[in-house]
Image: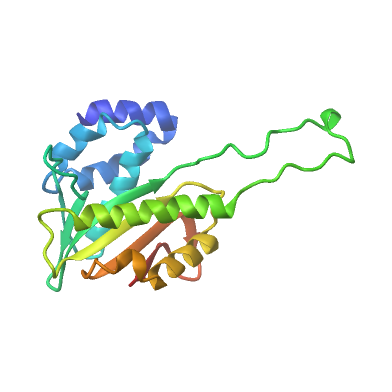
Amino acid sequence: MIEEIFSKLRDAYGDKAPEFIPLINLVKQFKGAKSFFKDALGFKDIRDFIVALIFVSYFHHAKCSVEFIPRSKKEKTPDLCIANSEFRGFVEIKHIHDKHDGPKKVLPNESETNEKLEEYGNYTRDEKYCRDDIIKGFKQIQNFSGLKKTDTMIVAIWNSDEDLEEIDMKSSLNQLIKEKNEFKNMSNPKCIIYGSDWYSLRRQTQFHVFRF
């Protein structure tokens, strides 16, 4: 299965594909990894596989045990179960893909000086999509039969959409956490973990944790 996945990685990433071998070797040791790799062969976008690897590595290096939750025909399941000496949590991974191609390219001889520039980006539209996806993630964990009242619910977001900037995303997540109506029936501890290719030099990390 790993050879088939690596073939897909070569198609998507070319010469950069071998860079993911250490991540694959790390992740394949965890419980449930075989089932995860099998599911990954059916992913429409191989980047979803990479995002899962990134978050598994993140939790592993945060000193948590990591287990993949097998898919069930009876119910929708979270992606991961993580735990350490202080807590147990269930993780739903969300990948925000590129949604829009942006403005079309205009050659110099095609543009006129009085032509209005095409608008690029739509924060309200993109923020709503992310917000809805996050709420959907929490509800999926909430409805999981294996969830106990003491378990932490975690939505892990990886943002590949450069239209939605890091600062805008942080503002959106903080506002979402302040809302009460969406989460009034979710008494479990909750947090959102946000990551992207953008590396924060000030915080020395790609990951940001937002606690409720």
Q: How many marks?
A: 0
Q: Quadrant of the C terminus?
A: bottom left
The image shows residue 4 at horizontal and vertical percentages of 25, 25
Q: Position of residue 126 (x, y in %)?
A: 52, 50
Side of 146 where 51 appears, left or right: right
Q: Is residue 57 visible?
A: no
Q: Is 95 in front, or is 114?
A: 114
For the N terminus, the image quarter is: top left
Along the horizontal axis of the image, is 44 left or right of 102?
left
> Is 140 placed above or below 50 here?
below
Q: Residue at x 57, y 49 (%)?
A: 163
Q: What is the x, y in percent for residue 36?
A: 19, 39
For residue 40, what is the image quadrant?
Answer: top left
Dividing the picture into quadrants, the one containing residue 84 is: bottom left
How is the rendered protein coloured?
Answer: rainbow
For residue 11, above or below residue 60:
above
Which quadrant of the structure image shows residue 204? bottom left
Residue 152 versus residue 72 in the image, above or below: below
At x 10%, y 56%, the residue is: 146
Using the rendered image of the protein, determine whether residue 152 is visible from the camera's viewpoint. yes
Vertical arrangement, residue 79 with respect to residue 87, above or below: above
Which residue is more in the foreground, 102 or 17? 102
Left or right of 199 in this view: 40: left
Give x and y (percent) for residue 62.
Answer: 25, 65
Residue in the image at 55% along x and 56% along y: 165
Question: Which sits in the foreground, 197 or 154?
Answer: 154
Name which residue lies at 89% across and 41% down: 114
